[in-house]
Image: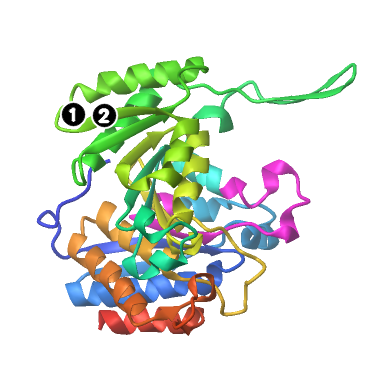
């Protein structure tokens, strides 16, 4: 992945695939689109937003979670903005037809092998975290998770009959190539931050992790300006709670990253606050990490900040529009500074607002 510079394309015309999906997706995605439109106009950029069905919505329309038309749109766009997929309505379907398979299909078909998940605490929300202010004040962690390898994709896998019942099995497997490319992403990103990478594995037990550590050390030879540390995953889980400020970039596998990124998210007070970027090839995909939240869908109760911040990540990583991304992130902080809170981050003395009002206030702050 190479982040484009602002000098390369000062005024851009970009096509963005908009996949709202299920649950709260159709409520929060329009907020991100409106913010991107406003920022684009200020910067003289033209964004074309093309909408398509994905996940459960697509199953209802076509019988399949990732229709060919949606996949083709994603492949021919400059970036993908994704809301959320899934819900109880589709849980009884065969595994291959469930909404979540759309995510795996998009990642595979777009070559998205790296997931970037920031956990940055807005100072205004320090009291919303379950941890003490002095522990979490100023944290800014980026989890770089390998996305297309490891135990989720390794073979053999399955469930087979045994004389006494059944046996379920999955295979954790990584190649030198897979580890090398994700390590380069982590080191490249760290160069734009505090120049510290903590590689998380379980090399004392797993052979796949032993290879992971060996390859990461080899890649690091080309990044001597970045400090490299190693940590076992169980210790990392503890350290994220004990002293999260020690981390800058956390580099890890698919399974470990899935778990650790959600843990890191809760340091910030709410999983609804956080965006993510899936990158690797020419088309990046940007989505909040909170899921479809069907229990609050349609109630104007969802926090749109993670979705709006995902749009900011798209500007920063796919389009090289750092100033525009800063504009969005500053607007979010300004509205939080005004005391506005959705239900997930509400606290005594703050003003409770719904999805639409929070979105409108961020839009107004952009101007």
Q: Residues within 10 Å of mark 2 (few under 14, many from 20)?
A: some
Q: Residue at x 43, y 67 (%)?
A: 127
Say few, some or many: other residues with alpha carbon within 10 Å of mark 1 (under 14 / 14 to 19 / 20 or more): some
Which residue position is annotated with label 2? Answer: 228
Tell me which segment is drawn in magenta.
Answer: 74-102
Which quadrant holds residue 166? Answer: top right
Q: How is the image coloured?
A: rainbow
Q: Which residue is the extreme one toward the left?
A: 7
Q: Nearer the viewer, residue 133 or 32?
A: 133
Tally the marks: 2
Q: Nearer the viewer, mark 2 or mark 1?
A: 2
Label pair 2/1, CB-CB below 8 angstroms: yes
Figure check: 86 above or below 188: below
Where residue 146 sits, quadrant-wise, is top left
Quarter of the image that includes the N terminus: top left
Q: Secondary structure at mark 1?
A: loop
Query: For the point 45% across and 53% down, which residue is it?
Result: 265
Q: Regarding mark 2 in the picture, which secondary structure is present there? A: strand
Find residue 335 and name its label. none
Q: Position of residue 319 (x, y in %)?
A: 24, 56
Of residue 134 and residue 281, the one placed in the foreground of this image is 134
Residue 318 in sight: no
Q: CA distance from mark 2 to mark 1?
A: 9 Å
Quadrant, the C terminus: bottom left
Percent x, y for residue 185? Answer: 29, 37
Residue position for label 1: 223
Q: Is 86 inside the magenta-drawn segment?
A: yes
237 vs 47: above or below: above
Task: Report the residue at 73% width, 59% height from top.
Answer: 88
């Amino acid at each position: 992945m190479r982040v484009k510079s602002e000098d390369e394309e000062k005024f851009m015309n970009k096509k963005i695939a908009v996949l709202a999906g299920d649950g709260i997706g159709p409520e929060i995605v329009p907020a991100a689109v409106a913010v991107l439109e406003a920022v684009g106009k200020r910067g003289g950029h033209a964004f074309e937003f093309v909408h398509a069905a994905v996940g459960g919505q697509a199953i209802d329309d076509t019988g399949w979670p990732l229709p060919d038309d949606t996949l083709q749109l994603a492949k021919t766009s400059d970036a993908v903005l994704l809301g959320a997929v899934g819900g109880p309505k589709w849980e009884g379907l065969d595994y291959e037809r469930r909404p979540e398979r759309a995510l795996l299909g998009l990642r595979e078909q777009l070559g998205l092998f790296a997931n970037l998940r920031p956990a940055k605490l807005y100072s205004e929300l320090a009291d919303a975290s379950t941890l003490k202010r002095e522990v979490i004040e100023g944290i800014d962690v980026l989890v770089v998770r390998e996305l297309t390898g490891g135990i989720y994709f390794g073979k053999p896998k399955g469930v087979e009959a045994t004389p006494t019942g059944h046996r379920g099995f999955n295979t954790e497997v990584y190649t030198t190539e897979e580890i090398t490319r994700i390590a380069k992403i982590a080191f490249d990103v760290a160069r734009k931050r505090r120049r510290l990478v903590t590689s998380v594995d379980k090399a004392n037990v797993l052979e796949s992790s032993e290879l992971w550590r060996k390859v990461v050390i080899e890649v690091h030879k080309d990044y001597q300006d970045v400090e490299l540390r190693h940590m076992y995953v169980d210790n990392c889980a503890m350290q994220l709670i004990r002293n999260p400020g020690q981390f800058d970039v956390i580099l890890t596998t698919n399974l470990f990253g899935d778990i650790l990124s959600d843990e890191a998210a809760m340091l910030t007070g709410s999983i609804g606050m956080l965006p993510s970027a899936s990158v690797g090839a020419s088309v990046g995909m940007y989505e909040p990490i909170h899921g479809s939240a069907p229990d609050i869908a349609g109630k104007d109760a969802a926090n749109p900040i993670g979705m709006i911040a995902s749009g900011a990540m798209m500007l920063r990583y796919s389009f090289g529009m750092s100033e525009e991304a800063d504009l969005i992130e500053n607007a979010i902080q300004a509205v939080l500074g005004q005391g506005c809170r959705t239900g997930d981050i509400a606290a005594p003395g703050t003003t409770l607002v719904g999805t639409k009002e929070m979105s409108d206030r961020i839009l107004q702050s952009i101007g």
